Amino acid sequence: MPMPSFRTALAAAAALALLAGPARAAIEDGYDPGGAPVPSTWYAPADPAARKADRDYVAGMRPHHAGALSMSRDYLADPEARSPMLRALAAGIIRNQAFEIGLLDEVARNLALPPRVFDLGFARLAMQPAATEGMGQMQRFLRSPIPGPLGAAMGPVSLRDVQFAKAMIVHHQAALDMAHGYHADPAARNGFLGLLNTDIVTDQGQEIALMRRVIGAYPGDAAAVAVDEGMVHGMEGMRHGAAPHADHAAPPAEAPPAAAPHRHPAPRARPAPQHGHAHGMTH
């Protein structure tokens, strides 16, 4: 049996590198400020089911992120928004999720391109452009940190603060449901979206814990604070990986069920559900 040529071996190695994809995360933790941005394209084997799963996910998560931005802007514009911690959180949501919207738009742009065919001599591989790495470097973006005890004081907690926290918890939980749904879909194999989902699950899980702390510091009866359905934006675009859930249709008047499903008194601060398994998600 003849040995493959050196040129064919190089082509095969290049194709395998495309399949493996870059090693860095969807949103880089940092970058070299003096370095030149070098964006690179992620590829995945061309598959109509995988392409549909990715498009459905982007069609759901993008308007959902946009809803978080409008909710945060409405909150920051309200004179009754008094919690320094929540105000810092809302500003971080606007910055971080606006960048993630750009990543989702770039995924959609790649998915709209036709597959590229790589001829290896002994085989032909159809590879679908799936995402663009290096957007953080190109935009000089650094993620806003989640407020902590040293970053922003708890301060006074108003009724409006509790309304925002409750509504955003419902909103964040829907994003977690969508992220977990994508990972559970056997057709969903976009490694870049997998890494972005890990960021979403980690960040929004921690933000839920912070917002529950703020609700627990409210001096009144937090369970009696009503949240109007119109305060939760961007839910109508969800369709991939989001199972039907009562919280998604209409926010309850009391704290979200995940916080205290079996108790009726006003909710106090309690640990958020742990999402540590998200760090082990792979595609």
Image (cartoon, grey):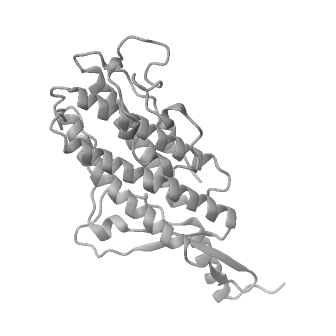
Is residue 74 positioned above or below 104 on the image? above
Is residue 92 positioned above or below 115 on the image? above
Residue name at image x 29 percent, y 63 percent: 31
**Residue 141 in the image, given as x and y percentages of width and height:** 28, 61
Residue name at image x 31 percent, y 67 percent: 137
Is residue 270 positioned above or below 57 on the image? above
**Quadrant assignment, res 50:** bottom right
The answer to whether residue 51 is left or right of residue 100 is: right
Q: Nearer the viewer, residue 11 or 237?
A: 237
Residue name at image x 24 percent, y 16 percent: 220
Is residue 161 positioned above or below 115 on the image? above
The answer to whether residue 234 is left or right of residue 140 is: right
The answer to whether residue 197 is left or right of residue 157 is: right
Q: Quadrant of the N terminus?
A: bottom right
Q: Quadrant of the C terminus?
A: bottom right
**Residue 91 in the image, given as x and y percentages of width and height:** 23, 47
Q: Nearer the viewer, residue 200 or 1?
A: 200
**Residue 229 in the image, given as x and y percentages of width and height:** 41, 36
Q: Is residue 68 visible?
A: yes
